[in-house]
Amino acid sequence: MSSQNGPAPLPLDEELAAVAARVAGLLLPRESVEAVLDLVVTLAVPAVPGVAGAGVTLVDDAGGFTTTAASDDATRAADALQYELGEGPCLTALAEGTTVRVDDIAIERRWRRWCAAADGSGFRAVLSVPLLTNDDRHGAIKVYGRQPGAFGDTAEEVLAKFAGQAATLVANARAHDRADRFSDLFLATLRERDTINLAKGVLVERDGVDEETAFGTLLATAHARDRSPAAAARELLDAARDRRAGAAG
């Protein structure tokens, strides 16, 4: 490792709290994970000295990686090389759940292929911190510098604190997204149940049968027409409305 920047005062806790408060102001049920991460990246650039680019790698639902937010195209391209080659400081930080610092890409030997590919990016230093909560690894935040040894112990400590706040925000935003998807599915299920119940009522009245027999008829119709029970129920209700409209006319 090369020598690091001299010690510098850490940001006051009040200042870090103010950063968190700015991000937390975005945390509403309708906000997306992407919107949260865009703000995280925007705030990370001035929060850590020596940053020329910043980005967030997020683990998707399938276990893949994507740069969900980036301050610039060069950062996005450097990240894309890691995903393509399957190696790099951000992926290591995420896999091992630990901070990874690269003082000089030109002489780093841990990820030879990525370092060789990224050597022409204009970046020389990298600092990557995982986004961890008690129950999950959500991704990693990373900053790139154009000078060797751009990030010292102070930068590590600041980005680690920032990553802890960002991880909580990402976890909460994802929870909101999952809750919204569950709510939509739940409401759709209720609507389908109501549609099926209405169709059963039409069959009970039309055929003079009980509900169990009516439901059996609906299922048989759905199977014969290669429809879901809800779709068959909607078709039956549409046909009943058309008959009533024709009779009224």
Image (cartoon, rainbow, N blue to C red):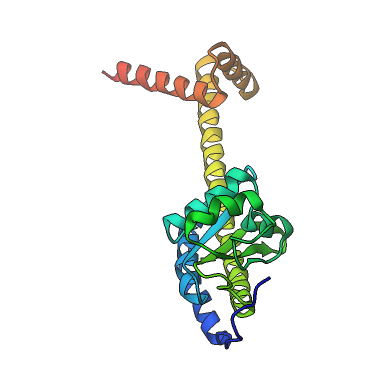
**Percent of width and height locating residue 192:** 53, 33
Is residue 248 visible in the rendered image? The answer is yes
Number of marks in picture: 0
Say left or right for 234 vs 241.
Answer: right
Picture quadrant where residue 167 is located:
bottom right
Q: Nearer the viewer, residue 175 or 192?
A: 175
Picture quadrant where residue 173 is located:
bottom right
Q: Please name the residue shown 63% across and 61% down the image.
A: 107
For the view shown, which residue lies furthest in the top direction? Answer: 224
Q: Please name the residue shown 58% across and 87% down the image.
A: 8
Q: Nearer the viewer, residue 17 or 86?
A: 86
Is residue 66 visible in the rendered image? The answer is no
Which part of the image, by quadrant, shows the C terminus? top left
Q: Is residue 64 above or below residue 230?
A: below
Q: Nearer the viewer, residue 150 or 89?
A: 150
**Percent of width and height locating residue 163:** 60, 68
Which part of the image, by quadrant, shows the N terminus? bottom right
**Percent of width and height locating residue 169:** 56, 65
For the view shown, which residue lies furthest in the front direction? Answer: 107
Q: Please name the residue shown 56% across and 23% down the image.
A: 228
**Percent of width and height locating residue 125:** 57, 66
Q: Please name the residue shown 57% across and 11% down the image.
A: 224
For the view shown, which residue lies furthest in the left direction? Answer: 249
Q: Is residue 102 above or below residue 183?
A: below
